[in-house]
Image (spheres, grey):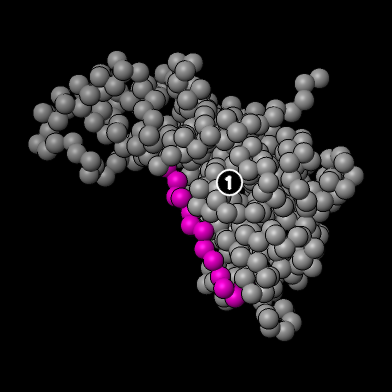
Amino acid sequence: MAGPPRLALAEVRAAEERLRDRLHRTPLLTSGSLDRLTGRRLLFKCELFQRTGSFKIRGALNAVRSLVEESKRAGGGLPRAVVTHSSGNHGQALACAAQAEGNAYADLQPQLREQLGSRQRARGKRRAGKCSSKHPALTPLEIAAVSLSRTHAGATIGKAWLAPAALTGCLQLFGCRICFLFHHAGIPAYIVVPRTAPHCKQAAIRTYGATLVPCEPNDKSRAETASRVVQETGGVMVHPNQEPAVIAGQGTIALEVLEQAPEVNAIVAPVGGGGMIAGIAVAIKALRPDVKVFAAEPRNADDCYQSKVRGELTPNLHPPDTIADAVKTSIGPNTWPIIRDLVDDVLTVSEEEIKRATRLVWERMKLLIEPTAGVGVAAVLSEQFQAVPRDVENVCIVLCGGNVDLSSLTWLTDLPGKVE
């Protein structure tokens, strides 16, 4: 039986090119007070400033662009839909990527585009005004057709199927207003989200036009629900952390860090499913094998640590209880071999350490990171990290996201004492 696909630097470089000029080059910030606390020079890679508020857009956009490129090579149109399961950040990223790539790609054959253009010009001559980018209000019938067209030909709406002929009829009916339809439809995105996911993340997914599908907060329910949605919609599954294109996209973080701070000695990043740490490790160990790669995870969700200790993939047996909602999932079959071979160590931290580190960054750096981003900071502040040799002086910590559910900050008042 074939093993999991192994990623190489070439895939990360290809992702870098695919994402060029489409994403932010996030800054590396420093903090004198945190340097003094750790006795090292800390460099904070601020992925909270990335599009959609986290690093996840790197992998999602690379995956969607890869799908569109593959479809073009095969002479086809856009994917019927993209599907994933997510605790929130990957869901936002995939919805954003699907919307952006769908809007940038005209899913029309040249002959049909010319036919529509001719009809638009003829209708424009018959009307008093011209068809412009500022369209008049759509009629109820047109709005209904636009809603239907968002699923593309052959996709499902509930139990009803929209046939290609029906879509063609819509195109013929609306003539000059067809540009509205194709500029706003995008690729339909279906995001399976645990019912316990932060409300701010669920709201953001909807903002990008995706359909939310609720599931129970465990890996089994996420996978089963996503599989069902794929079957119902005919969509393509874009796994949040095991999809090779996603892992490669996340690896572009490391390429930027090496360019921004070639003196770096170590990179520390939170680990959930392992897509980010695996992508980073592939790039770092190919270009700078001397640089240490550390994964950081909550002690309450320590499947990566347990896997490293046992030498075999050891998923969490039960849904973890941690404030770091974005790393509740376990590493998987595609990320585990990379983590096993290329990640130097896995550091675990308590819930209180995560809370204190998150609050520390808020107060000292004025950066509104989410608690998952605080996991890496907590790891570097921990006693475990004090055992790392002192010549590992320049340490980059990936602040993976800033999608904070402000309505859930009751834990702040429960945190004893003050941050030192």
Q: Is residue 381 above or below residue 287?
A: below
Instruction: Report if residue 362 is visible in the image.
Output: no
For disc 1, the marked residue is 254
* Depth check, front residue: 381 or 387: 387
Q: Main secondary structure of the magenta part?
A: loop
Q: Position of residue 17 (x, y in %)?
A: 46, 35
Q: Relative to residue 264, is residue 321 drawn left or right?
A: right
State which quarter of the image contains the C terminus: bottom right
Decide: few, some or many residues near mark 1? Use Cα within 10 Å; few <14, some 14-19, many ≥20: many
Give the residue displayed 69% in from the left and 33% down from the top: 227
Q: Relative to residue 355, is residue 135 drawn left or right?
A: left
Q: How many numbered circles are shown? A: 1
Instruction: Report if residue 184 is visible in the image.
Output: yes
Is residue 96 in the magenta section? no
* Depth check, front residue: 167 or 269: 269
Q: Is residue 337 above or below residue 194?
A: above
Q: What kind of element bears circle 1?
A: helix
Amino acid carrying label 1: it is Ala
* Depth check, front residue: 324 or 13: 13
Q: Position of residue 395 (x, y in %)?
A: 64, 59
* Depth check, front residue: 171 or 291: 291
Q: State the extent of the magenta-drawn residues as a range.
A: 22-34
Q: Is residue 236 above or below residue 199?
A: above
